[in-house]
């Protein structure tokens, strides 16, 4: 074949961002929005990548991050033959929703499928995380791998650097509302900020990491028990710890407060922080499953969504 396609999911981190970089567990959930890529064979190199209006060539010594990331992804052994890739993400860039990881996984899947032809998907998938990691290291230095894992597998899972992903089976569906500050965030910067705090005062930062570890442990139990009130409280606690690590902003705090005041069971930033998005847990009574008072619920849900839309439009 002369062309092949690949897709990947965006993600939200439900609990444990940043602490996961230091070996703690975190919980992520795949989104139904994500990234898509199509790869076409080239007779000779260099490989090229088009995302929106920008076309770059794979170049390991470029000063452009995208050129180096694309090169890094292609040259993980076994190196991929020359390709042209057209990719797009349906997620806001720098929004903390895993746009960069989703692009890397979609691009890898398309280029691998083209290069390996009929090879089993499982063999391709084994290399996807490695290539995505090479790409992510260019953009943010020290990725834990949770974003690429979510992009590749979707679903809800617990993740640690040492053990990888373990699926979680929530007892009930979760309805999350995602609110954007409209401000881009740089995961590289916020991960770097915590690294410098850690270098200065490792004991203090470790205390926050330990707090997050216990929040995540309880969150797994709450998900499995279907205790959404506890889950909301744990989100609020996780947000407090993240603020204590200085990765929250006044806009993120305002959005969390707005969501809670509108009836959310809990709210927190998601991903790197310093901008980007907030997630809020919508109470089960606001979700319509056909067995409840749908009109009332629709109104309540609309109230939450309206409040959020207002905030998003700022
Ligand atoms: C970003 O989605 C999550 C962080 O923990 C960074 C990482 O784990 O690579 C902030």
Image (cartoon, rainbow, N blue to C red):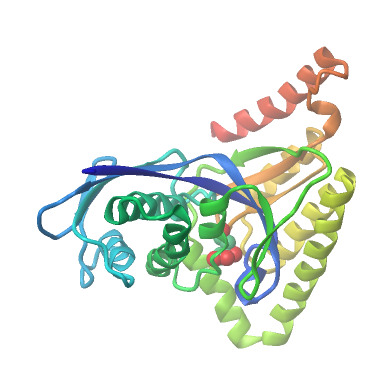
The x and y percentages for residue 245 are: 67, 69
Q: Residue at x 42, y 58 (%)?
A: 124
Q: Give the residue at the far left of this rendering.
A: 44
Viewer-proximal residue among 48 and 93: 48
Q: Is residue 272 visible?
A: no
| Camera-nearest residue between 287 and 106 | 106
In the figure, is residue 169 to the left or right of 150?
Answer: right
Picture coordinates of residue 221 (x, y %)? 86, 57
Left or right, residue 124 beside residue 209: left
Q: Quadrant of the C terminus?
A: top right
Q: Is residue 123 visible?
A: yes
- Residue at the (67%, 43%) spot, across then down: 255
Nearest the viewer among 197 and 113 is 113
Q: Is residue 202 above or below residue 306?
A: below
What residue is rendered at 14% in x and 60% in y?
Answer: 46
> Residue 75: horizontal and vertical position, in percent?
28, 69
Q: Splitting the image into 4 quarters, where does residue 78 fall? A: bottom left
User: Which sits in the foreground, 111 or 181?
Assistant: 111
Residue 132, position as x, y percentages in the image: 42, 62
Left or right of residue 145, residue 222 in this image = right
Please determine whether, in this image, residue 92 is positioned above or below residue 218: above
State the quadrant of the N terminus. Answer: top left
């Amino acid at each position: 074949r002369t062309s092949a396609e690949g897709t990947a999911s965006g993600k939200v981190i439900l609990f444990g961002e940043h602490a996961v970089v230091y070996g703690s567990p975190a919980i992520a959930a795949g989104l139904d929005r994500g990234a898509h890529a199509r790869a076409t064979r080239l007779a000779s190199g260099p490989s090229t990548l088009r995302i929106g209006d920008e076309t770059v060539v794979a170049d390991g010594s470029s000063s452009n991050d995208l050129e180096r990331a694309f090169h890094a992804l292609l040259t993980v052994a076994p190196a991929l033959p020359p390709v042209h890739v057209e990719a797009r993400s349906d997620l806001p860039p720098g929004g903390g929703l895993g746009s960069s990881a989703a692009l890397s996984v979609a691009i890898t899947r398309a280029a691998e499928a083209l290069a390996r032809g009929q090879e089993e998907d499982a063999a391709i998938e084994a290399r996807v995380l490695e290539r995505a990691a090479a790409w992510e290291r260019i953009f943010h230095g020290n990725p834990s791998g949770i974003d690429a894992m979510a992009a590749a597998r979707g679903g809800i899972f617990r993740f640690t650097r040492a053990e990888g992903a373990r699926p979680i089976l929530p007892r009930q569906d979760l309805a999350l509302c995602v609110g954007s500050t409209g401000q881009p965030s740089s995961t590289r910067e916020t991960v770097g900020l915590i690294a410098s705090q850690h270098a200065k005062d490792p004991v203090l930062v470790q205390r926050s990491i330990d707090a997050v570890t216990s929040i995540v442990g309880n969150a797994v139990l709450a998900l499995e028990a279907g205790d959404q009130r506890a889950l909301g409280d744990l989100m609020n606690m996780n947000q407090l710890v993240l603020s204590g690590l200085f990765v929250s902003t006044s806009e993120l705090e305002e959005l969390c407060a707005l969501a809670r005041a509108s009836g959310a069971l809990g709210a927190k930033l998601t991903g790197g922080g310093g901008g980007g998005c907030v997630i809020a847990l919508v109470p089960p009574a606001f979700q319509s499953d056909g067995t409840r008072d749908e009109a009332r619920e629709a109104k309540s849900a609309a109230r939450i969504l309206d409040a959020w839309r207002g905030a998003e439009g700022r």
